[in-house]
Structure formats: structure tokens, C-alpha cells
Amino acid sequence: MTDGAQGGKRILVTGMSGLIGGMAGRSLARNNYVRALNRQDVEGVDCVRADISDPEAIGPAFEGIDTVVHMAAYLGPEFSGQVSGNLIGAYNVFEAAREAGVKRVIFGSSGATQMQYEVDEPIKAMVEARWDDVPSPRRILTPQDPPRPNGIYGAAKLWGEALGRYYSDAHGMSVICVRIGRVVKEDWPYDARHAAVYCSHRDVIQMVEKCVSAPESVRFDLFYAVSNNRGRYRDIDHSREVIGFVPEDGIPEWPMERPG
């Protein structure tokens, strides 16, 4: 990996031991200097071991960094974990970035911020692959539609997005929030609902890389990271227009056998 001296950036990836952080971080490391902020070591990468709930411990990770990719998150059911990992932790990351003079933060958000729309038709038909009940044109949710989280995790991610808006407005930081679809190690959907919100490994990596290299004029924005699935109800036109994200993959039918 480079040191960022020849056109590359100096990037901090939080949660790089996780699936998305690991894939994105290693891809970015091909042409940039990448450092990890993690609770455990990440092989082959400079790593600061700390918990994002501890503001003093994470400070050194941000020194000399120009771009932060924040993928660390608490995914469990406990409210205390949401508070420390997704509320306090998100604040600590934004504040440490501000103090270090970081130019851009890419915040890993989630489709859970609007997942409750799936209980209503016609989106319900789309996530159940009832194609005869899906109107044409189909219903597409955009970032301008009201939030509708399906649980505390989605609500916590909305907090992170709001923090990003604040830090962009108040401190001039570029903040890009990415509502990531369902990404799994197997890189293939489990069921009809998953097939609608599926985001392939290639597509989530592409989205992060497009956000990292987005023009400086992008001061604040919110994008969906989802593959071009038949059951897709989340907008991808906006990210294509602003940063050139065009999904390489998608689930054209469901059920279907995995190719190869």
C-alpha cells in the first residue's frame, strides 16, 4: 500500500475487521495509505487499537488523515450497545475528525433508516417478489422521503446522519452518508427480501471508492448503496448523477440459482 504521497489519500477506516470495512479498506489500500481504527489488530495495515466509545484513545488514529471511512457499528439488540457504539461512538468519530482537520467523513449508514416502509404496498410486494402486484412505474424511495426506521439501530443511524449534516454545516467538513443495503459474506441473497436490498461486494466497494474520490464540491450528501435488483425500491439515480455510481451487479429475478 502507498503512503499517499503520489496522489493517493491518507484514509482511516473504522471497523476494518468487519466485512464491509475490511473489503473497502483493502481495496482502497491499493492506491492510498490506509490506517485502521479497530478493537483488534488488522493484519497488513497500520492499526490503532481502541474503542470508538473512548474519545481520548481514538484521537491518535486521526493524526495526518484526510479522509475517514466510518464503518464501525454495533449491530446487536442491546440499547446500551446502541448508545456506546452508534450514538456516542459516532459523535466521537466526527469530533476527532474535526479536531484533526479531516477533510471528509464517509459515514456508513443503513437502509434500516427507512425499512418500515416495507410493511406497506407496493414495497411489500417488491420485497416478497410478488411481481404481479408491483405497479409500473414502481415505487422508489429517495433520501428526501421521511425517515421510517424499523428499530433502534435504524434510529441510531439517523442520529449519525444528522451529526454529519451538522458537522458539514458548522465546521465545513465534507460528509457523505451511505445507506448500505444487505451485504453478506456469501455475496448472495438468502430470501426474497434480501434479494430486493442486496448489495454485492463489488458494488459496496465501488460506492465507498466513489465517495472517497468525490469532488470537493460535495459538501454533504446521502446515497443508497444497493445493487440493481428487480425488487429494488431504493434510489440509485442520485448517486449516479453526483458521483458516478453504477451498480455492476443485481438480482434480476427471485427465486433464482446462483450463477456458476
Image (cartoon, helix red, strand yellow):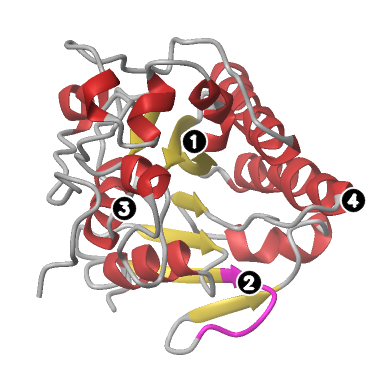
CB contact under 8 Å: marks 4 and 1: no
- The residue tagged 2 is 38
Residue 111: numbered disc: 1
- The residue tagged 4 is 80
CB contact under 8 Å: marks 1 and 2: no
The one of 1 and 224 positioned closer to us in this rendering: 224
- 123 to 253, vertically: above or below: above
Whether residue 165 is visible here, answered yes or no, is yes
Magenta span of residues: 37-42
> What kind of secondary structure does the magenta stretch mostly adopt?
loop
Circle 1: element type: helix
Residue 77, given in percent of the width and then of the height, sits at 79, 53
Q: Is residue 238 left or right of residue 122?
A: left
Circle 2: element type: strand
- The residue tagged 3 is 204
Q: Within 10 Å of the Cα at label 2, are there few (<14), some (14-19), or many (20+) other Cα atoms?
A: many
Q: Please tell me which residue is depicted at 58% across the width and 17% down the height of the picture.
A: 147
- Locate the N terminus and report the quarter of the image it occupies: bottom left
Residue type at mark 4 is: Ser
Mark 4–mark 3 Cα distance, whole angstroms, equals 29 Å
